[in-house]
Image (cartoon, rainbow, N blue to C red):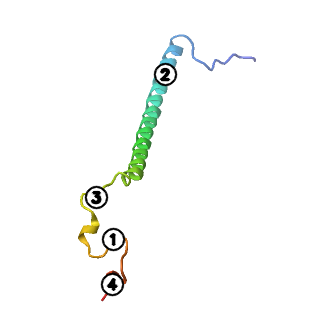
Amino acid sequence: MNQRHDHFPEGADFNASLRSRYRVATIWQILFLSALLIAIIALTALLYNVVDGAFGYIAYEYKDDPAEFTSTPVNEPTKDNYSSS
């Protein structure tokens, strides 16, 4: 009445099963490491874009002063400049 049921392979079947499990685990490991690498590259690109956007304006310098091209100083616009007629 008390029969022994083996649920785990033994011997050559065990080694074949183990190799199969390692192969599947290696595939998943490569997949997740690739996803992690892509995420790190994307976040680095995003950080570069933010830093470039923040400090790009500070380093901007005019080749010619804009005040040279207007009769009114640039800091003092008049209402005539904004009229629609």
How far apart are the two marked residues, 2 and 1, measured between alpha carbons?
71 Å
Q: Nearer the viewer, mark 2 or mark 4?
A: 4
How far apart are the two marked residues, 2 and 4, measured between alpha carbons?
77 Å
Q: Which mark is residue 48?
A: none
Find disc 3 in the rendering and name its residue. 62
Judge from the rendering whether residue 26 lies leftward or rightward of residue 56; answer left or right: right
Question: Pointer 2 and pointer 4: residues touching (CB < 8 Å)?
Answer: no
* Residue 76 percent coordinates (x, y): 37, 75
Query: Disc 4 residue type?
Result: Asp
Query: Disc 1 residue type?
Result: Val
Judging from the image, what secondary structure is the residue with disc 1 in? loop
Q: Earlier in the sequence, mark 2 or mark 1?
A: 2
Q: Earlier in the sequence, mark 4 or mark 1?
A: 1
**Residue 54 vertical placement versus 15 (above, below):** below
Q: Quadrant of the C terminus?
A: bottom left
Judge from the rendering whether residue 6 lies leftward or rightward of residue 37; answer left or right: right
How far apart are the two marked residues, 3 and 2, measured between alpha carbons?
62 Å
**Residue 85 vertical placement versus 32 (above, below):** below
Find disc 1 in the rendering and name its residue. 74
How far apart are the two marked residues, 4 and 3, measured between alpha carbons?
26 Å
Question: Pointer 3 and pointer 2: residues touching (CB < 8 Å)?
Answer: no
How far apart are the two marked residues, 4 and 1, measured between alpha carbons?
14 Å
Find disc 4 in the rendering and name its residue. 80
Find disc 2 in the rendering and name its residue. 22
Judging from the image, what secondary structure is the residue with disc 2 in? helix
**Residue nearer the viewer, 31 or 8:** 31
Q: Nearer the viewer, mark 2 or mark 1?
A: 1
| Quarter residue 4 falls in | top right
Query: Disc 2 residue type?
Result: Tyr
Residue shown at 33% from the left, 71% from the top: 74
